[in-house]
């Protein structure tokens, strides 16, 4: 079974520029998450999708961050304009639904550096 | 949202020893916990899930959950240098427990 795919793996941009990340979850996983992980910290949830609908985006800085999941499969996370404090690893995770398993599986992440 | 706390370490153990990693949580209603391993520069990898009070063993790993003390631990027997990583504890929350709150992680160093 293929895992969660993400691209790009690395991105360096200047502040005030825009950037987009892509995620393809494990096949059949209806729930998709975007996390931000700052060095030395645990992952912090940004947004949760169930199929193509948003379940929770309460921790997404909506003035600069946006995310969508068209057709309930792939998802993109965008930052516009980027700030220095957005430098972090952006992780996508997915989880199956309709079972008692709450396990989430992570993709390789995108390391963003804002200069 | 639940609080999950871990000692950031580093925890240093010699090769072959038992490494004991601990996690405390704030929500008495928590029913399950997860341990993720994260190598430097890599993403978190799920290594253990525990859904009930007591111990769960998987190879060299044992997870222990004590709901009365709001405490969960991960024991790694016969520690190997390849076990050197950061170990993240996570607890589910929210409707249908579909979200995870992570601790800051404990860095484990296994020395030769």
Image (cartoon, coloured by chain):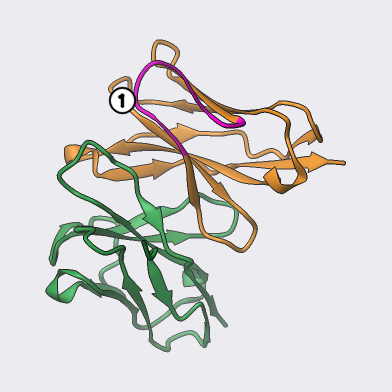
Chain colours: A green, B orange
Magenta stretch prevailing secondary structure: strand
* Residue ID at (40%, 32%): B33
The one nearer the camera, A108 or A1, is: A1
Q: Which residues lie in the magenta part?
A: B48-60
Q: Is residue B58 magenta?
A: yes
Neighbourhood count class around disc 1 (C-alpha, 10 Å): few under 14, some 14–19, many 20 upward: some
The one nearer the camera, B32 or A82, is: B32
The one nearer the camera, B74 or A44, is: B74
* Residue ID at (29%, 56%): A59
* Residue ID at (25%, 74%): A74
Screen quadrant of the C terminus of chain A? bottom right
Relative vertical location of residue A56 with respect to residue B110 in this rendering, above or below: below
Q: Position of residue A58 (x, y in %)?
A: 23, 55
Q: Position of residue A48 (x, y in %)?
A: 24, 57
Mark 1 falls within which chain? B
* Residue linked to disc 1: B31
């Amino acid at each position: 079974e293929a895992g969660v795919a993400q691209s790009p793996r690395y991105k360096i941009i200047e502040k005030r520029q825009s950037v987009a990340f892509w995620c393809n979850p494990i096949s059949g996983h209806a729930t998709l998450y975007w996390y931000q992980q700052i060095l030395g910290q645990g992952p912090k949830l940004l947004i949760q999708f169930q199929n193509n609908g948003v379940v929770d985006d309460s921790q997404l800085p909506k003035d600069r961050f946006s995310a969508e999941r068209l057709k309930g499969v792939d998802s993109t996370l965008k930052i516009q304009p980027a700030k220095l404090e957005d430098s972090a690893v952006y992780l996508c995770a997915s989880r199956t639904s309709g079972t008692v398993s709450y396990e989430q599986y992570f993709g390789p992440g995108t390391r963003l550096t804002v200069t | 949202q639940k609080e999950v706390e871990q000692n950031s370490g580093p925890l240093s153990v010699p090769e072959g020893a038992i490494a004991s990693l601990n996690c405390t949580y704030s929500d008495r209603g928590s029913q399950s916990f997860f341990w993720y391993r994260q190598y430097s520069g890599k993403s978190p990898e799920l290594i253990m899930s525990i859904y009930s009070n007591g111990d769960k063993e998987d190879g060299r790993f044992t997870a222990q959950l004590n709901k009365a003390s709001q405490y969960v631990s991960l024991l790694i027997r016969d520690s190997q240098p390849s076990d050197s990583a950061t170990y993240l504890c996570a607890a589910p929350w929210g409707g249908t427990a579909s979200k995870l709150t992570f601790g800051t992680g404990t860095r484990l160093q296994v020395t030769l």
